[in-house]
Image (spheres, rainbow, N blue to C red):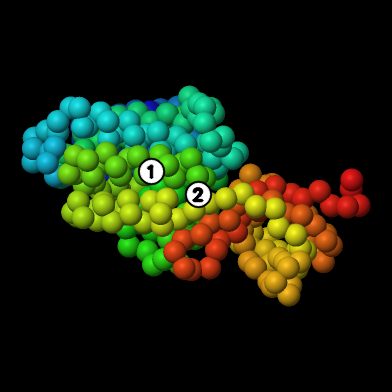
Amino acid sequence: MNQQDRLHLLAEQKFLRGQLETLPRSAKLTRMSVESRMQTVDEQLKRVPPDEQAPARVQLTFNGRPVIGSHGIFADFGMKAVNSFVEAVSAMAASIQAPLASTGPIPNREQHQLLITNTALGSFGFELEEYLTQKLISEEYSSVAQALSKTRDLLQGILGGTDEEFADFVSETDLRALEKIRGFLQILADNEAVCTLQYRERSVRFTDVGQIRKSLERLSQDNLSESEEILDGEFHGLLPKSRTFEFGLAENDGKIITGKVGINIRDAESLNQHLYEPVKAKMMVTRIGGIRPRYVLLELPQWEDTK
């Protein structure tokens, strides 16, 4: 029994209590039946801890040449597309915990599994559910849940975002996870298919293959480039909540750039203890077209006084 089942039981419990309050005393048999069901519901609720978090669930539906209405989908395309999407989510989830190597197996992949739990109505597709390897309290969000949010938002940014918004999304996405997203879109384009991704209360929808191809162009290596660079300069400040920093370059007349602290850096606030100290900072620099580059700090610098 999951958290969704618990919510249904709570709703039924409330309904049954209302019934008991309105039943006349003469309806003895009905009262006995309601009380019996009430006792069953109470016992079932005791078996479900109230602080368990429901697993993340997502709907992925397809349309286009490989889809036969709401009746079915060609198996070879369906397997390739779903597997590619799962690989993208797995890479995104792993990158939340630590930067990914350019090659080799995705780390901790077994912790980022998705289950196919049902077919999704509409065109044709699937309902996928996170396979939780451990219980989470309600305040926590698993790496898979975070990865699904980032994947949905990234696809929306690729599809309809401005160049500035697109650059922000891309700069905060691991390069290997980005490659997996590109691979998923390529499978759609090759098969003249489109998709809709529904996660939580928001969705992203590709309505025609032209949008898929345009998205691939935005992700192409001709349009964007990422490189690790060592920049000389000094930090001028950090906003801890947004993890945004200002950095004065030693060159270019002390030009001030802004960037984000990488998600793998836990003690980001320590930057504020070393303001205006000369330092070499390792950053990922993302360049897209002619807009200003995006900077992400990859690791905390080695300050001179700690060497």
Camera-side residue of 259 and 228: 228
Q: Quadrant of the C terminus?
A: top right
Q: Residue visible at 45% across and 34% down?
A: 90
Q: Position of residue 133 (x, y in %)?
A: 49, 26
Confirm whether residue 56 shows in the render. no
Residue 30, position as x, y percentages in the image: 21, 35
Chain-order first, disc 1 or disc 2: 2
Secondary element at tag 1:
helix
Q: Is residue 284 left or right of residue 304?
A: left
Q: From the viewer's side, name the closer residue of 92 and 185.
A: 185
Q: Are marks 1 and 2 in contact (CB under 8 Å)?
A: yes
Residue 182, given in percent of the width and then of the height, sits at: 36, 44
269 and 295: which is toward the camera: 295
The residue depicted at 19 percent of the width and 51 percent of the height is: 209
Instruction: Name the residue carrying label 1.
Output: 181
Mark 1–mark 2 Cα distance, whole angstroms, equals 10 Å
